[in-house]
Amino acid sequence: MLAKALLEDCITAALSTGGDFAEVFVEDRFSNTLALVGGKVDSSVSGREYGIGIRIVQGTNCVYAYTNDGSRESLLRVAKAAAEALPGVSGTRCLNLLKGALPQVNLIHALPHTIDKQRKVALMTRAYQIAKEYDPIISQVSVRYFDEDQHVQIANSSGLLVEDRRVRTRTSITAIASKGAEKQSGTYAPGAHMGFEFYDKIDIDTYAREAARIASTMIHADYAPSGRMPVIIDNEFGGVIFHEACGHSLEATSVAKKTSVFADKIGEKIASEAVSAVDDGTIPNAWGSLNVDDEGHPTRRNLLIENGILRGYLVDMLNGRRMQAKATGNSRRQSYKFAPTSRMTNTFILPGPYSKDEIIANTEYGLFARYMGGGSVNPATGEFNFAVNEAYMVRNGKVMEPVRGASLIGKGSEILMRIDMVANNLACGQGMCGSLSGSVPTDVGQPTLRVSEITVGGRKGDK
Amino acid sequence: MDVQSFAQALFTRGRTMGFRDMEVYASSRNQFRVGVFKTEIDSYTLAESRGLMFRGLINGKMGYSFTENFADEGLETLLKDALENAAIMDGDAGEEIFAGAAPDNYTHIDAFSESLPEVPAGEKIAWVKAVEGQAYALDNRVFTAQVSVGDTFGETLIMNSHGLKLSHRDNFAAGYISAVVKEGADTKQSYAFVAARDFTRFDAAKLAKEAVEEALSLLGAEPVPSGSYPVVLRKDVALTFLSTFASSFSADAAQKGMSLLKGKVNERIMSEIVTIIDDPHLAERPNASPFDAEGFPTRKKAVVEGGVLTTLLHNQKTAKKEGVMSTGNAHKAAYNAPVGVAHSNFYIVPGQNCYQALLTQMGDGLIITSIQGTHAGANPVSGDFSLSAYGYLVKGGQVVRPVNQITIAGNFFTMLCDVRAVGDDLDFGVGAIGAPSLFIGSLAVAGT
């Protein structure tokens, strides 16, 4: 991390032209990535990423520069080069950075570097064996283990100076089932803002079995039908529907420039009354949690939708200026190589009154999407798509045969209005979310819910 | 410390720690990008980054570590990490440090333009503003246009303890526009890109027109009824498909049981009118290089010829397992990734049919001009896909109306067996993968 005097000099150099705000982001990140394929360690890579990002803002315009060279000479050169991109001359200013006390909501007990790599391999090997032995139809299992220890230091011309340490770990298990020339895969990838103690808190066997179960179920499944129908989306990673269909369109990156379908809609009904949703970066040790965001501000629990009414957006400092809105502790970036912007943390739909069984029992015909894959959205048109990794047909209130290869498409604004039943079994799943400021860890979540009609893209035309 | 001195220091110290063969793979990249929104420069990025990966062979096992901090004190940590990583590897991995090839095995590739770095920032800013201005001027339904332009200069260096020392540098510029058009409550968006090493080839008017006209042409789009349709995959969509399933051609994926092409060499896997080439010597394309990620000399080859799989892509390790020569396709996803296998510049060879001829042959069907969500809705292991798409409805070889809110579903390999005609319009977009438009006999479409 940089000395306070050097940070102050950098900020002063950055403001040597017409900038009205400057920020220095220092990152030192240690990571380990291990891959186990077919029961053998296929790769193990450790390393250190290190760099400094300097951001200068003038009104709503932004200059961003970064370098790996943390020497005084280099940093002042980069800060000045960045400043030269802005017109104007500097006023007199006096900067005295004051190091702030940080809320520590994500306590870490077993730092990754203190854990012998053999223990990490043992964990992966166990996951491999459980998945491989689940069913003879499982032909291959690959396990990826990842941990990181990210140190950040953030200083800005408003006098803010904070340091944070984010420790995360995640294990991804992919099982492949083969039958003749066909292959189907199942993946489960639990993670947390935690050290190695995470694996004491979860049972890796459960996840390994789930990955194998999905693959072995899907290899026997016929193709999903096509067309519009009711869809029941299960809890946990099913929350990707809200993440894609709504969450991205509530980020200030698209709201501020009014390219989002939900721009200027605060106080208006954008979803059915069954829907309330939040973004909460403060959940202790959750995958998408942070003590402070990448602008140095404490994360918050932000109410987004209350009984269908739009209550708030996810706002960063720069877009906050465009929107005349306060930042919400959602400014994030993949690394020093990205200027921060508004992003989701842990985003989920709140529980409703029904049980999952009631929802299924009340559905005559439709698709039950038990485990979702990823998806994407175009915030300008609101059109989203996502993949269903494990799905079943529902007939006469019962979950029937599995079907494969389904995707769901629609428009966020329409789908939110069609959520007609929400269960009481809220759970979250982990994902990596890619957008303007790179790929960041986010939790998605929801209780089991039903959408009265979505277009299901399958390969079979019958009903 | 500079990279070469750091590498030498690593080799010297590494030897005393028991590493037999060692390699340093270093990359550096400088980037510039400027974006304009409503005539203001709203983003401006200056970047310089470098990173170094070490790998060393000890007791027959390869250990990897990387850093972006080239200070002296980082050296010991780097070696210690590599040692620990080697210790947990299984012994029979078969990975080696390349001893090197004769200099004339390496094809000279000129991927660096001396004139590009001389283009002043002001000229690029003027170009971005011109694109934005033209976009708004084209039609009053243009709601927003976001435009940016950038250039990048990168260098790769491989040094190893056998004395091999290779380097390659490249630069290019790329421009981008995203145009949003609105008519009543109907919003549509389209993009256009340009990439070249010669900035004088950046045509502001053409780029603005391409994005705006396409977005306008999509206004009023409606789904079509579910069913099976003949389709023309426009060149950019054909390219996205090839890119999504390109990992199937990796021998590494095949050996790990993660590719349907395992054991299929010399078998017919596609329509006989499909030929796919891997060409690392196309100097204009991003993955051009005389050597691969292991320092092995690269070469051009057909991967699929007349529908027959002629070879999988190999690095040294996968080649050794099958008793063949490396195809020069060792690849790192980033400087700090382990050595894997991937294509270089990879494309479907164009045919004789102009775009309209494909539509005429199809008669009634769909043109697909965009697919979304390939990271989730397409499975490279199974070849299956079900993807959100849009495009146009075609009747009698003529475009009738725009189509959206549909999915297309099928299997990549089955689809490529059903290629009825190949277009003459090979295009790489801004990347390393290229394709012409393809006329496909039938795909499952979900709509109304």
Image (cartoon, coloured by chain):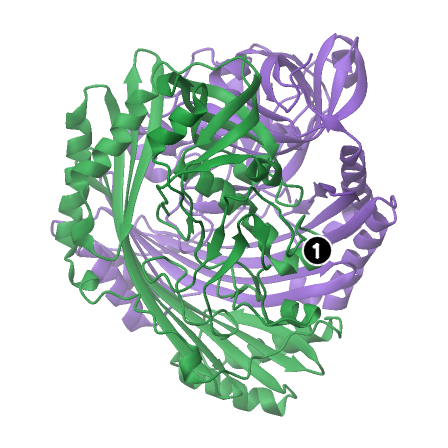
Q: Is residue A37 left or right of residue B374?
A: right
Name which quarter of the figure residue A398 lies in: top right
Residue B313 vs residue B126, the one in the foreground: B313
- Which residue is found at the position 47% from the left and 11% from the top? A269
Vertical position of residue A145 compared to residue B156: above or below? above
Q: Amino acid at mark 1?
A: Gly
The hue in which chain B appears in the rendered picture of the protein: green
Circle 1: element type? loop
Residue A216 vs residue B302, the one in the foreground: B302
Query: Would you name the residue on which mark 1 appears?
Result: B263
Residue A356 vs residue A167, the one in the foreground: A356
The hue in which chain A appears in the rendered picture of the protein: purple
On the image, the x and y values in percent for residue B171 come to: 29, 62
Vertical position of residue B146 compared to residue B156: above or below? above
Q: Is residue A17 visible?
A: no
On the image, the x and y values in percent for residue A376 come to: 51, 33
- Which residue is found at the position 21% from the left and 56% from the top? B198
Residue B395 vs residue A381, the one in the foreground: B395
Vertical position of residue B55 compared to residue B244: above or below? below
Label 1 neighbour load within 10 Å: few <14, some 14-19, many 20+: few
On the image, the x and y values in percent for residue B318 come to: 65, 67
Vertical position of residue B369 compared to residue A317: above or below? above
Q: In which quadrant of the rendered image does the C terminus of chain A lie?
A: top right
